Amino acid sequence: MNGLVKAIESRYHGEFMTVAIAGSVAVGKSTFANELAEKLKINVAVVSTDDFLFSNQFLQEHQLFDRKGFPETYDLDALTKLIAQFKSGNQLVRIPHYDQKIADIDHNVTRIVNKPDILIIEGVVALQLSIIDFKIYLDATIENIKRWYLTRTLELTEKAKHDPNSWRHQYAHMPVKEFTKLVMAVWENTNQVNLDKYISPSKSNADAIVYLNENHQVEKIEYV
């Protein structure tokens, strides 16, 4: 991680800079982004591409809901505009808020982002943006990614057992074996397709590829 920090800081010349972090669902993008932000010695803000998903209503109206998470379900123009606003000198920018509990954009909440020295954008489509200064791709074996996805989903759904406001609550009382089968079917039919067709190919845009081991720890970093 220290080498990656130095590589980013060497490209920072006192002006606003963007860093993108992409990779598969469940590979650990959010955690990695926050860890990187803590290690950088300048002012950093982290934004998730999830905040730029179109609302569920929009996706349903445009027959896109079953492809949620694919590139066409994100408002990439709005995300590009956010970057452009900071580059043009705006000090404060409002962005939408994606609420993980309801799995939708919360129209009652907006986030105010103060212009940072470095803006980290993390998410499955982050490397598909054109105006990024430094691009990072997180990689791991598909076996580990699928295991992390299942483990995370089971844990979050268990936590939602007593929270009827969570979209996961409807699944919280399913038998584990039956729910596991459902979770992995979603993986194969949606997340694996997205990974193969869109996410993994964006690796070719990366300045650095970070390989994670089975414990989510950095194994090696390859600079492209």
Image (cartoon, rainbow, N blue to C red):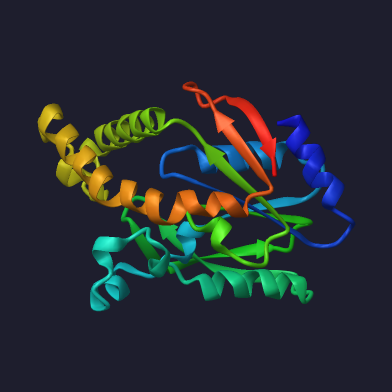
Residue positioned 18% across, 37% down in the render: 172
Residue 146: which quarter of the image?
Answer: top left
Residue 151: which quarter of the image?
Answer: top left
Viewer-proximal residue, 153 or 4?
4
Residue 53: which quarter of the image?
Answer: bottom left
Q: Is residue 104 left or right of residue 90?
A: left
Compared with 45, 77 (above or below) is below
Residue positioned 67% across, 36% down in the render: 222
Residue positioned 39% across, 65% down in the render: 106
Compared with 124, 5 (above or below) is above
Measured from the top left, where is residue 56 in percent x and y? 30, 67
Viewer-proximal residue, 112 or 14?
14
Residue 71 visible in rendering = yes
Q: Is residue 145 left or right of residue 208?
A: left
Q: Is residue 128 left or right of residue 176?
A: right
Measured from the top left, where is residue 80 in percent x and y? 60, 71
